[in-house]
Image (cartoon, rainbow, N blue to C red):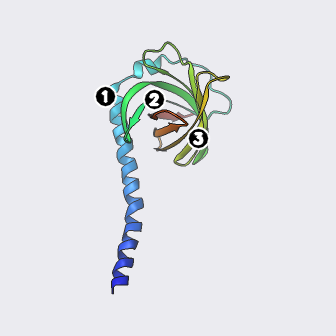
Amino acid sequence: MKKTVLVIIICSLLAVMPISMGMYNNILIQNCKQDLTEINPISKIEQAPVEEPPNWANGNFSGIWGLDIWGETHLPLGWMFGYYKRNPNIGYFYAGFESFWGENDTWFIQGYFFGPFMFGSLGENEYANESLFVGLGSYNNTNYHWRLMGQTGPTFFMYGEYTKF
């Protein structure tokens, strides 16, 4: 009898955990939408340089980045704008980013994502001062939210909206 009860409890936990994670991701994406409208750095994002998209890109994205403290999006520090090439769950991205008080996008971030996992490099320019990072996040049809952790330093977040071409 004890074994049967134990098996039922374990099976119910295994069934409930994925469902709760799915609900958490939807709540997280909804909160990101609210944060974007509350902070409203869109005026800075609109000033991002408008260029022809690269041949490999099948969409673009724009958003906010900042410090991530205890898994929450705190301290927005700047804007970002970039392009991506995505198949259903696999893709490549490249973006320029800068602080809200910066003049132009002097920093870059590039990498790959596979479902909820991301890895790549970021740096001050394409030739020096690069650092590797890994990330974990989620996205739906219009929004994204990622947490990034580098070799050294704090954990960052980035979230925003993206559009397919």
Disc 3, SS? strand
Residue at far bottom of view: 1
Please tell me which of labels 1 and 3 falls first in the chain.
1
Give the residue pinned by disc 1. Answer: 38
Q: Quadrant of the C terminus?
A: top right
User: Type of residue at label 3?
Assistant: Phe
The local secondary structure at tag 2 comes to: strand
Real-space Cα distance between discs 1 and 2? Answer: 13 Å
What residue lies at 50% left-to-right and 26% top-to-bottom?
Answer: 80
- Point out the frontmost of discs 1 and 3: 3
Q: What x and y, as percent, mark residue 57?
A: 63, 33
Q: Is residue 85 visible?
A: no
Residue at 52% of width from left, 42% of height from top? 135
At a point 39% along the width and 61% down the height, the residue shown is: 17
- Answer with mark 1 or mark 2, whichever residue precedes in sequence: 1
Q: Position of residue 8 (x, y in %)?
A: 36, 77
Residue carrying label 2: 63
Q: Amino acid at mark 2?
A: Gly
Three-letter code for the amino acid on which mark 1 is drawn:
Glu
- In the displayed structure, would residue 7 be above or below residue 45? below
On screen, residue 65 above or below 86: above
Q: In the rendered image, which quarter contains the N terminus? A: bottom left
On the rendered structure, is 55 left or right of 107? right
- Where does label 3 land, which residue? 119
Is residue 102 among what the camera can see?
yes
| Residue 137 image label | none
Q: Is residue 153 above or below residue 2?
A: above
Q: How many marks?
A: 3
Judge depth for marks 3 and 2 and give the one in front: 3
Residues packed near mark 1 inside 10 Å, few (<14), some (14 to 19) or many (20 plus) = few
Which residue of the protein is positioned furthest toward the front in this rendering? 152
